[in-house]
Amino acid sequence: MMNTLKQSTLNSQRGAATLLTAVILLISITLVTLFTSKTVLVETQMAADNYRTSQAVAAANAAMDYGVAYFNAGGLDHNADLVVDYTTASRCNLKLSSATQTNAQTLCNPATAASGVQATSAQMFYNNNIASCTTENNMKSALITAIGFSDDGLGQRTITQCVGTIDVFGGNTPKQPLVSRGAVGLTGNYNIINRYTDISIWSGSTVGIGSSNSAATYIRPVGTAVTAFTTAQLEDTTTNNAWTASAISNKDVGNGVDIIASDPNLGNLTGDAFFENFFSGTRTDMKNMAIAAGQYYTNIASAAGQSGVIWIEGDTSLSGITIGSQTNPAIVIVNGNLDVASGPNIYGMLYVAGQMDAAGTPSVFGSSVVEGNSAIMAAGGKTGANVIGHGTVNLVYTPSTLDQSPAPILGTTTIVSGSWRDW
């Protein structure tokens, strides 16, 4: 009986170890499964976060590139109303953040919904009075803050960058409507006006004012201050008004006090020294700046309607076009001889390395500077004075199209070194 009972108990305990092992294995498999699922979930989340971050960084960089390009094309005030711009372009909407802020906000969008509601991918803020960028409250420097977003709006990245403007004149912008390293021999009808500095022609050699009854130079009335007149009056092309003195130099009175002739400080300069007397960089620097702006030409006609730094290589003829504008001036450098025919208008600075022959009706609002390189003149078959011509020439000194331009000249935008922040 006893043996039978022990045998029955022993039989009932068989399989316990197997069951325990099975339970342990089942629990282990469950834990491994849960751990694996958690790992996959975390890795999926990390991959999604990385993708969102990449999208946000790409959007922020795109917004920053747009902002720098927009600033380079005319600063913060493209319409020259002295207020940070407000536009409604369909792709990048530049607008005031609010009525109380002086910032502008740009929304750069890769797509626009059919209803016209834009799917915002980046926001960009301009501020034209940031201590970290500039101490001046103008439209020639700014802090650009670009905020990029992922497509679902969960990822966000902010980058900032200071931009400024290269002073291409280096503080030595011409202060006269006509500057020549050599002789000036205009014989036609001309008006040369300077109501700012009272010097109309500055030459390193002789100045012949011609015998035309209509040829004369003008300044503002004696005893008046520049501040007594508006910019429009100071830069007016007419002369029969209260803000213009009677002719100072003409065929009857000869060269007046507004003409500096035979100045050895100017005439004795080498060609390169003369060039660098008005520009902060060398010829190569200015040429490369024009190339970078896509404005290097062999014919000045190609520059029609354009602004910024423009380089013309070789002899060329100018006729019937406008280069630059009152609000977006140009720096036109002709590395050759320039023949001027009918009706061109240039706003800004015209620099001629060879001879300028004004046989037509040119008007330059800013300053004309003529180097008169003898080698260039000889190669082009030119003789005589550096500046000649019997046309109807109108030269008006307008600093608002030179160093006092309210907007950066196209091609002169620069990134402030060390100002990039992406944290």
Image (tube, helix red, strand yellow):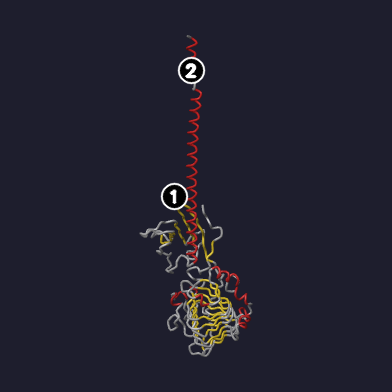
Dot 1 alpha-carbon crowd within 10 angstroms: few under 14, some 14 to 19, many 20 or more: few
Dot 2 alpha-carbon crowd within 10 angstroms: few under 14, some 14 to 19, many 20 or more: few
Q: Which mark is residue 11?
A: 2
Please determine whether, in this image, residue 422 is positioned above or below residue 82: above
Circle 2 or circle 1, nearest the eye = 2
Q: Which mark is residue 154?
A: 1
Q: Depth check: 325 or 234 in front? A: 325
Q: Depth check: 170 or 330 in front? A: 330
Residue occupying the point 48% across, 88% down: 214
Q: Is residue 271 left or right of residue 16?
A: right
Q: Do the residues labelled 2 and 1 touch (CB within 8 Å)?
A: no
The picture places residue 135, in percent across and down from the top left corner, at: 50, 62
Question: Label 2's element?
Answer: helix
Residue 212 visible in image: yes
Q: Tell me the distance, in whole angstroms, between the alpha carbons under discs 2 and 1.
A: 64 Å
The picture places residue 277, in percent across and down from the top left corner, at: 59, 74
Q: Which three-letter amino acid code belongs to the residue tagged 1?
A: Leu
Q: Which three-letter amino acid code belongs to the residue tagged 2?
A: Asn
The picture places residue 253, in percent across and down from the top left corner, at: 52, 89
Residue 262 visible in image: no
Question: Label 1's element?
Answer: loop
Determine the image quadrant of residue 182. Answer: bottom right
Please determine whether, in this image, residue 385 is positioned above or below residue 73: below
